[in-house]
Amino acid sequence: MADNAAKPVVSDDMMAGLLAAIKRAESVPAIDTLIDKIDDEDWLSNDPDGWNINAGSDEGESEIDSLDEVQAA
């Protein structure tokens, strides 16, 4: 029965493109984000409900610290 399993048809060009895309993705450096740096005690508490972490929001600009200002520039 396993011999009858459908296998995707992939051309050599398509396979080369997929492998190249995977290699490019592997070469991108990954860094910790703010969410990665928050410990479980804070993240799992009720406090995050009040955090202003909406992308593109103008609210809370006074809360931006010096590190964020450097990153935004």
Image (spheres, rainbow, N blue to C red):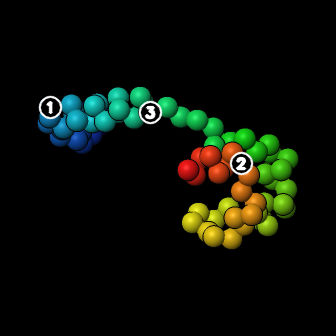
Question: Label 3 crowding class (10 Å Cα cut-off): few <14, some 14-19, many 20+?
Answer: few
Residue under the image location 71 percent in, 48 percent down: 66
Q: Quadrant of the N terminus?
A: top left
25 relative position to 62: left or right: left
Q: Mark 1: which amino acid?
A: Asp
Q: Which residue is mark 3?
A: 28
What label does residue 12 carry, if any?
1
Point out residue 10 in the picture as x, y percentages from the top left corner: 18, 38
Nearest the viewer among 36 and 57 is 57
Please rate how many residues cluster around mark 2, counting C-alpha atoms within 10 Å: few if below 14, some from 14 to 19, many from 20.
few
SS at mark 1 in the image: helix
Q: Quadrant of residue 50?
A: bottom right
Residue 37: x %, y % from top left: 72, 41
Q: Is residue 27 visible?
A: yes
Residue 25, given in percent of the width and then of the height, sits at: 39, 35
Q: Secondary structure at mark 2?
A: helix
Query: Three-letter amino acid code at disc 2?
Result: Ser
